[in-house]
Amino acid sequence: MTSSKFNNFFLGLFEYYTPKIVLIKNIKVGILNRFVQLAIISYIIGYAIIYNKGYQDFSPIESSVTTKVKGIAYTNYSKSDFNDLVPDIEVYRRIWDTADYVVPPSESNAFFVITNIVITANQTQGHCPEDPDVSKCFSDRDCIPGTSHITANGVYTGKCVTSDQNSTLKVCEIYGWCPVERDVNPLKNNKALLSSTKKFTVLIKNFVDFPKFKIRRRNIPDYYDDKYLKHCNYHRVNDPLCPIFVLEDIVPGNYDEIAVKVCSLLWRF
């Protein structure tokens, strides 16, 4: 028995198989065969590779953007530059740095720069005349005590008094933060108080991590050192990789006109 198994094993080492090819000369079978082959190839190339991008691997991303605004403004305007309705021009004559005009100091993937401001100095809670544009009156009966409305600056005390903004008008007296804000542009000719911010710069750092591939990218080239970043400004032709932008360059339209009111920009990287 053992000898027979050994002989079979030994003879099997010298045996080999060849496939048998059958040529079928049938048009219907040939068409079906080619159709199946074409379907398989189309699925692999068209769907799995091209449409479904099977040759690619994907990773979730972790991204963060930090910004840093730089610039100093000095609003030492002359008296003739200020609006005549501004009660105290001295509060506007001062130095403004990033701690003053970037509010809040940090935001998530955003930054805010004050370009115009109305200052109501030394407000305290008490009794004072309401804004004439909010509440005019002819007698105390027009000022119901304890009432208010959505645009009022406080609660009516029930008295109709002379306006501190225009002595020819009568307004309701309020209890609230006094004096009330006088909503007029500080400067004449519809000019923004901090129009000089257009020459300020913002450094934008964008970091993107691909944790699956252990790859990290940023918008600042590795060969840019601190010395270079202190002097470069973005320019589409001369310096397209510099991450420091002049505010005037990134705001569409006329910066001086936009700075008087408000502008919100959505910037995609």
Image: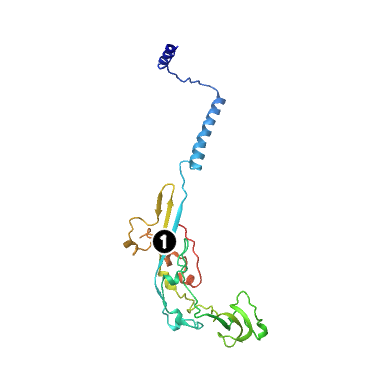
The residue at which mark 1 appears reads as 204
Q: Is residue 26 left or right of residue 59?
A: right
195 left or right of 39? left
Residue 59, image x and y in percent?
Answer: 46, 47
Colour approach in the figure = rainbow
Q: Secondary structure at mark 1?
A: strand
Residue furthest to the front: 2
Would residue 61 be found to the left or right of residue 132 on screen? left
Number of marks in the rendered image: 1
Give residue 55's position: percent from left, percent from top.
Answer: 46, 41
Along the line of sight, the residue nearer the viewer: 74 or 259: 74
Say above or below: 111 vs 208. below
> For the point 56% across and 25% down, which residue is it?
29
Extreme residue in the left direction: 227
Q: Residues within 10 Å of mark 1 (few under 14, many from 20)?
A: some
Front-lying residue, 61 or 262:
61
Q: Residue at x 54, y 31 (%)?
A: 36
Give the residue at x 45% y 53%. Answer: 62
The residue closer to the viewer here, 179 or 3, is 3
- Quarter containing the C terminus: bottom left
- In the image, is 146 to the left or to the right of 53? right
Q: Where is residue 68, by image quadrant?
A: bottom left
Q: Could you tell me residue 156's position as x and y percent? A: 63, 81
Q: Is residue 47 above or below residue 37?
A: below
Which residue in the rendered view is the most extreme toward the right? 141
